[in-house]
Each structure stands twice: as structure tokens, then as C-alpha cells.
Image (tube, rainbow, N blue to C red):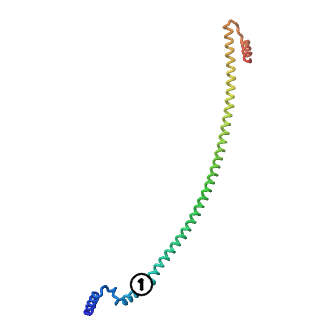
């Protein structure tokens, strides 16, 4: 057997030297075409039975994943729109409630302020009446004091001028003068 393989190699080497490249040797074309056809059939069968179904499954899975992701994204978008709408509604309600609270607080403050102003006005009015009474008292006291000073001054003037002054005539003269 070793001799047969050695002879075949030797024959092939002689043949290659004589003819050149074996793929260009017209004598080997039918053999090459046969093996080309067998190889193409095997590649076709491997591709159609093994590779292409796997590739198709991967593409289908990717397509399904993309479709599911798009559907989930659309669902999340709708939820986000609903959440935003609910947020805006809650914000509007909170602003309305805050406005009511502010108005109520203003009303309470105004009520307290009105009470305080009324109390202050009453205190001021009472102090004004009290002050007027004191002013009237001071005026009366001042008028009495002026009358006394006028009587004393008139008496001293009458005495200084060398006359005799009795209290009744000085009081009548001062009273007449004060009346106008």
C-alpha cells in the first residue's frame, strides 16, 4: 500500500509537471464539476436546514423584542401622560386650596385687625374723653389761677398807687374785666 501511494504521488507529480495547474487541466473538469456540485448541495442543505432557521429565529426574536419594547414604550408614554395630567390636576387643586387657605387667613387676620382697631379706637376715645376732662379741669384751674393772680395784682397796684383796696371791689372789677 505504501508503494501505491508513493506511485500515485509520483504519477501526480509527473502529471503536474507535464500539464501545469490541475484546475486548468481539461481532463479533470468533470471530476471538479462533480465535487463542486456535491459541495454546493451540502452547503445548501446546511444553510437551509441549520443556519438559516437559526438566523430566522434570531431575527424573529429580535423583531418580537423590538415590537414588545415599542409597545411597552407606548404604554409607559401613556402612563407618563396620565401621571402628568394627574400631577397637573393635583397641582391645580393644591393651588386652589392654598388660595382658599390664604383667603381664610386674610379674613381671620382682618377680623382680628378690625377687633384690635375697634379696641384701640375705644381706648383712644376713652383717653380723649379723659384728656378733655383733664384739659377742662386745667382750663378751669388756670382760669381760677388767672383770676387769683389778677386779683392779687390789682390789689397790689391799688396799694402801690396809694389807694385802699377792699376784696369785694377788686373781685367785682376782675370779674367784669374777664367777662369782656
Give the residue drawn at x 70%, y 9%. 165
Image quadrant of residue 35?
Answer: bottom left
> Split into 4 quadrants, where in the image is the N terminus?
bottom left
Q: Give the crowd class for mark 1: few <14, some 14-19, many >=20 residues within 10 Å.
A: few
Towards the viewer: 124 or 165: 124
The relative height of residue 94 versus residue 31 in the rendered view (above or below) is: above
Q: Position of residue 23 (x, y in %)?
A: 34, 85
Q: Position of residue 84 (x, y in %)?
A: 58, 61
Give the residue drawn at x 56%, y 68%. 74
The relative height of residue 159 versus residue 79 in the rendered view (above or below) is: above
Q: Position of residue 85 (x, y in %)?
A: 60, 61
Q: Count numbered badges in the picture.
A: 1
Q: Position of residue 98 (x, y in %)?
A: 61, 52
> Split into 4 quadrants, where in the image is the C terminus?
top right
Towards the viewer: 65 or 28: 28
Image quadrant of residue 81?
Answer: bottom right
The relative height of residue 150 versus residue 117 in the rendered view (above or below) is: above
Please give the residue where the numbered disc 1 appears in the rendered image: 43
Q: Decide if residue 112 is on the left or right side of residue 59.
A: right
Farthest residue toward the top?
A: 162
Could you tell me which secondary element the residue under label 1 belongs to? helix
Give the residue drawn at x 69%, y 29%. 132
Amino acid at each position: 500500500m505504501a508503494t501505491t501511494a508513493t506511485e500515485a504521488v509520483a504519477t501526480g507529480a509527473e502529471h503536474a509537471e507535464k500539464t501545469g495547474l490541475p484546475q486548468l487541466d481539461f481532463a479533470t473538469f468533470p471530476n471538479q464539476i462533480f465535487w463542486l456540485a456535491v459541495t454546493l448541495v451540502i452547503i445548501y442543505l446546511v444553510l437551509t436546514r441549520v443556519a438559516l432557521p437559526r438566523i430566522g429565529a434570531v431575527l424573529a426574536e429580535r423583531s418580537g423584542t423590538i415590537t414588545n419594547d415599542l409597545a411597552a414604550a407606548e404604554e409607559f408614554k401613556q402612563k407618563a401622560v396620565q401621571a402628568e395630567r394627574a400631577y397637573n390636576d393635583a397641582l391645580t387643586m393644591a393651588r386652589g386650596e392654598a388660595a382658599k387657605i390664604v383667603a381664610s387667613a386674610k379674613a381671620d387676620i382682618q377680623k382680628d385687625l378690625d377687633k384690635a382697631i375697634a379696641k384701640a379706637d375705644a381706648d383712644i376715645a376713652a383717653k380723649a374723653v379723659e384728656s378733655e376732662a383733664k384739659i377742662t379741669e386745667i382750663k378751669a384751674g388756670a382760669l381760677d389761677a388767672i383770676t387769683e393772680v389778677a386779683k392779687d395784682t390789682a390789689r397790689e397796684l391799688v396799694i402801690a398807687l396809694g389807694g385802699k383796696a377792699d376784696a369785694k371791689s377788686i373781685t367785682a372789677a376782675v370779674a367784669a374785666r374777664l367777662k369782656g
